[in-house]
Amino acid sequence: MNPALNAEEFEVAPGFEHENLQGRVWDAASADELRQGLEKAFDYRGDVTITRRDGSSVEGYIFDRRTGTTLENSFIRLFPKSDPVKLAIPYSDIAALTFTGRDTAAGKSWEAWLRKYWEKKAAGETNIELQPENLD
């Protein structure tokens, strides 16, 4: 390691505030708005309900998206909540989306984990184990 390097002087990327999308309805008035909403849905760690242009809807977890040059050749892939078969839905078939499921990572951060740990330690607890919460 180069002794002239100081770890405290390295550039650090700033964090960001996680947007709370749970319960939000995204009605896309344009192709760009639809693409923005689907990017947010892809980053969301909960279920999303897709309302199709024919009026039908499907709820599930978006695990992949393929963006093409048009809405017709762009699509999302999701695990439906009520069916084990993965679905692919073209962007052009999507009228709206709703962030229906709980974002399982909302409010979770390394800092929150550490705060809980030190609170337990300061209270004199021993054998401290922070267990993941039940997601049901």
Image (cartoon, rainbow, N blue to C red):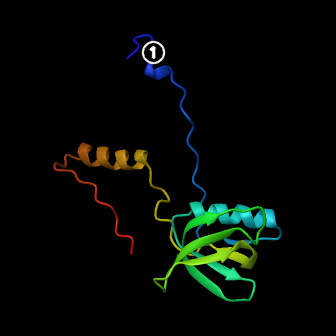
Looking at the rendered structure, the kind of residue marked 1 is: Leu
The picture quadrant where one finds residue 35 is bottom right
Looking at the figure, which quarter contains the C terminus? bottom left
> Quadrant location of residue 74?
bottom right
Quadrant in which the N terminus appears: top left
Asked whether 78 or 107 is in front, the reply is 78
Q: Between residues 60 and 73, which one lies in front from this camera angle?
A: 73
Disc 1: which residue: 5
> Dot 1: within a 10 Å radius of its alpha carbon, few (fewer than 14), some, or many (20 or more) residues?
few
Q: Is residue 69 left or right of residue 20?
A: right
Q: Which residue sits at x=34%, y=65%?
A: 133
Q: Dot 1 lies on which element?
A: loop
Judged left or right of residue 40, residue 126 is left
x and y percent of residue 125 in the render? 19, 49
Q: Residue at x 41, y 14 (%)?
A: 2
Residue 16 screen position, x and y as percent = 58, 46
* 133 to the left or right of 39: left
Measured from the top left, where is residue 22 in percent x and y? 58, 68
Residue at x 53% of width, y 31% of height: 12
Q: Residue at x 51, y 64 (%)?
A: 45
- Where does the image place residue 77, in percent across and percent down from the top left? 58, 72
Q: Is residue 107 above or below residue 63?
A: above
Q: Between 37 and 118, which is closer to the camera in this rendering?
A: 37
